[in-house]
Amino acid sequence: MNIDRQWAIPAAGFDSAWTKTTGSAANIVAVIDTGIDATHEDLQNLRLVDGYDFIHNQPITGRVNSDDNGHGTLVAGVLGASANNGLALSAPIGLFPLCRLRLWTPPAKADSNSVAQAITWAADHGANIINLSLVALVLGMMLH
């Protein structure tokens, strides 16, 4: 596997951890972020489960583009991008390629209540790992 383009993988010890596991479909990782472009060619092997869009108050189902910013797609790539397919959205391989991802999009002007709602909803719907990129959300809000 070509991980030389991902200095963080050996620095964090993921290459060693992969000898034990690369995740499990029993794990649901909630990505609370700007959305995911699930139509992206590097995310076609991503195991998605339905999520929820708190901006439009509607479920996210199927392979749709729910990301109007790009950050959530980047995060999804870091977590579960296809290995060594030459496309490299964000990485030659995601950190947990065998886990399932579920997405919750907090409102564009996310406040602590909205984020708390997304966390609660994620936990109530089976997420046992939650990724929060709150600094990115705050910066994104400041730039808009």
Image (cartoon, grey):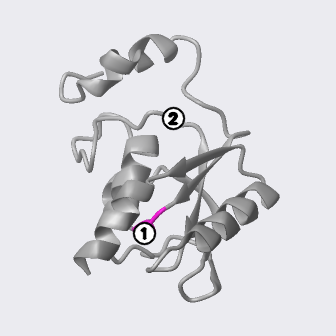
Which residue is at a point 44% across and 57% down the rendered structure image?
Answer: 134
Quarter occupied by the N terminus: top left
Relative image position of residue 141 (x, y in whole percent)? 34, 74
Relative image position of residue 16 (x, y in whole percent)? 44, 10
Q: Is residue 47 visible?
A: yes
Q: Nearer the viewer, residue 100 or 124?
A: 124
Residue 118, image quadrant: bottom right
Q: Residue 22: within the magenta?
A: no
Q: Nearer the viewer, residue 35 or 117?
A: 117
- Mark 2 → mark 1, Cα distance in angstroms: 20 Å
> Farthest residue in the bottom direction?
56
> Farthest residue in the left direction?
5
**Which residues are the magenta region?**
33-37
Where disc 2 sits, the SS reads loop
The reply to whether callout 2 and callout 1 are in contact (CB within 8 Å) is no
Give the label, 2 or 1, closer to the camera: 1
**Which residue carries the number 1 mark?**
34
Tell me, for residue 102, which label it has, or none.
Answer: none
- Left or right: residue 15 compared with residue 63: left
Where disc 1 sits, the SS reads loop
Earlier residue among tags 2 and 1 = 1
Examine the residues drawn in magenta and state their main secondary structure: loop
**Which residue carries the number 2 mark?**
96
Q: Amino acid at mark 2?
A: Phe
- Left or right: residue 70 compared with residue 53: left
Q: Is residue 51 visible?
A: no
Relative image position of residue 111 (x, y in whole percent)? 53, 73
Badge 1 density bin: few <14, some 14–19, many ≥20, Cα 10 Å:
many
